[in-house]
Image (cartoon, rainbow, N blue to C red):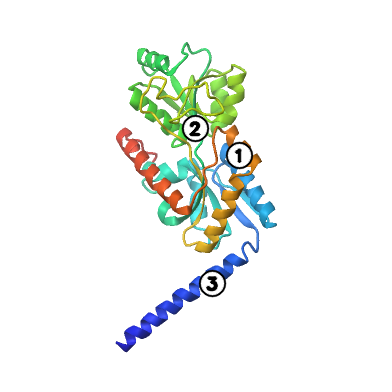
């Protein structure tokens, strides 16, 4: 009996001391530069958004935020690096559709598990994709694209920014639901994919807003639809895929900030509060709007729920389509 009480007291003291240490660390946070891992090369959508958030954090803290671009394997190389960093709040990572929502389903030997190895901080945005085609393709809407693909099985090609990337999965979901055979052509990043689409070497792509919008306005690309369940405020005249010929189709991008698992909760709460504030700044909202998105924000718990829900959705799709990358 006595030893049980002593053990309970020791356990309570250990918890109290750990909590006090975490609170003390949060009060002085950040006391040195923070590393922001970007799991993609410089210049892409993920990098631009992460750098904007990093810049705002640095301005608010009066402390340097070091951007660390670690591309490779659809964002999983950088995510694995961040997962293995010390959980002290001095490493954060930009989570994406590829490295947090679908990697578990695509890779048998993934070195990390998103919900086990990361502390969710905050959801940044869910940008839509654009279904675009080369203007030489004789289609004006999704119905016509499906009809053309059915009449020419295997002859149309769609570009993606890489096997396992969001626009690869968006394309495979489209093919499955529309029951068409369109050949997937993976590129090493979005820029070369868009370049070949503009050159007519591929005919179709699920593209992000920033590189596609100027080409749409210049009539070098034709937009057929947006991938999300509702129209974009940036292109309100463009219908959704569901409206335009493929009922039930809905897919959206995903950006979030996470930290290594076991990062002290007070530091996670501080990061969450600060990034929620940053997401409401006019220039940040404008940057997200240029991607066709609105700021998301919310709590770490809501982000964990988003990861869980989307993992389940895309795991069902990936299993049904039998897509594996190893």
**Numbered circle sitting on residue 310:** none
Q: Is residue 178 left or right of residue 187?
A: left
Image quadrant in which the C terminus is located: top left
Image marks 1 and 2: residues in contact by CB distance under 8 Å: no
| Labels 3 and 1: the sequence-earlier one | 3
Disc 2 is placed on an element classified as loop
x and y, in percent, of residue 147 in the image:
37, 14
Indicate which disc residue 21 carries. Answer: 3
**Label 3 CA crowd tier, 10 Å (few <14, some 14–19, many 20+):** few
Mark 1 vs mark 2, foreground winner is 1
| Residue 169 % position (x, y) | 41, 33
Could you tell me which secondary element the residue under label 1 belongs to? Answer: helix
Establish if 266 lies above or below 212. Answer: below
291 and 194: which one is in front?
A: 291
Residue closer to the observer: 54 or 136: 54
Residue 137 visible within the image: yes
For residue 128, the mark is: 2
* Residue 113 visible in rendering: no
Give me the residue at 62% from left, 18% from top.
Answer: 218
Q: Residue at x 49, y 32 (%)?
A: 128
Q: Which residue is pictured at 50% across the width and 71% down the height?
A: 19
Residues at discs 3 and 1 in contact (Cβ within 8 Å): no
Q: Element under label 3?
A: helix
Residue 285 image label: 1
Which is more N-terminal, label 2 or label 1? 2
As measured in the structure, the alpha-carbon distance from the residue carrying label 3 to the one carrying label 2 is 42 Å
């Amino acid at each position: 009996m006595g030893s049980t009480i002593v053990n309970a007291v020791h356990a309570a003291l250990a918890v109290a001391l750990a909590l006090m240490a975490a609170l003390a660390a949060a009060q002085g946070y950040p006391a040195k530069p923070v590393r922001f891992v970007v799991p993609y090369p410089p210049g892409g959508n993920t990098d631009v958004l992460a750098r904007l958030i990093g810049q705002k954090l640095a301005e608010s803290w009066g402390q340097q935020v070091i951007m660390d671009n670690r591309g490779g394997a659809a964002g999983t190389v950088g995510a694995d690096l961040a997962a293995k960093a010390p959980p002290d709040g001095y490493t954060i990572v930009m989570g994406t559709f590829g490295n947090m929502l679908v990697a578990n389903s695509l890779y048998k030997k993934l070195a990390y598990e998103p919900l086990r190895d990361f502390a969710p901080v905050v959801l940044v945005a869910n940008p839509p994709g654009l279904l675009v085609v080369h203007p030489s393709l004789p289609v004006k809407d999704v119905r016509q694209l499906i009809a053309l693909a059915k009449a020419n099985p295997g002859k149309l090609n769609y570009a993606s920014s890489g096997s396992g990337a969001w626009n690869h999965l968006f394309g495979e979901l489209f093919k499955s639901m529309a029951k068409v055979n369109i050949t997937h052509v993976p590129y090493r990043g979005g820029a070369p994919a868009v370049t070949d689409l503009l050159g007519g070497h591929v005919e179709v792509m699920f593209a992000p807003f920033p590189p596609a919008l100027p080409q749409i306005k210049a009539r070098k690309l034709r937009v057929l639809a947006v991938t999300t369940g509702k129209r974009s405020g940036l292109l309100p005249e463009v219908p959704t895929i569901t409206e335009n010929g493929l009922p039930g189709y809905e897919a959206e991008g995903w950006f979030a900030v996470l930290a290594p698992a076991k990062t002290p909760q007070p530091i996670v709460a501080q990061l969450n509060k600060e990034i929620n504030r940053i997401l409401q700044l006019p220039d940040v909202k404008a940057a997200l709007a240029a991607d066709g998105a609105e700021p998301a924000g919310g709590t770490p718990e809501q982000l964990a729920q988003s990861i869980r829900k989307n993992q389940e959705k895309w795991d069902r799709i990936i299993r049904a389509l039998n897509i594996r990358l190893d």
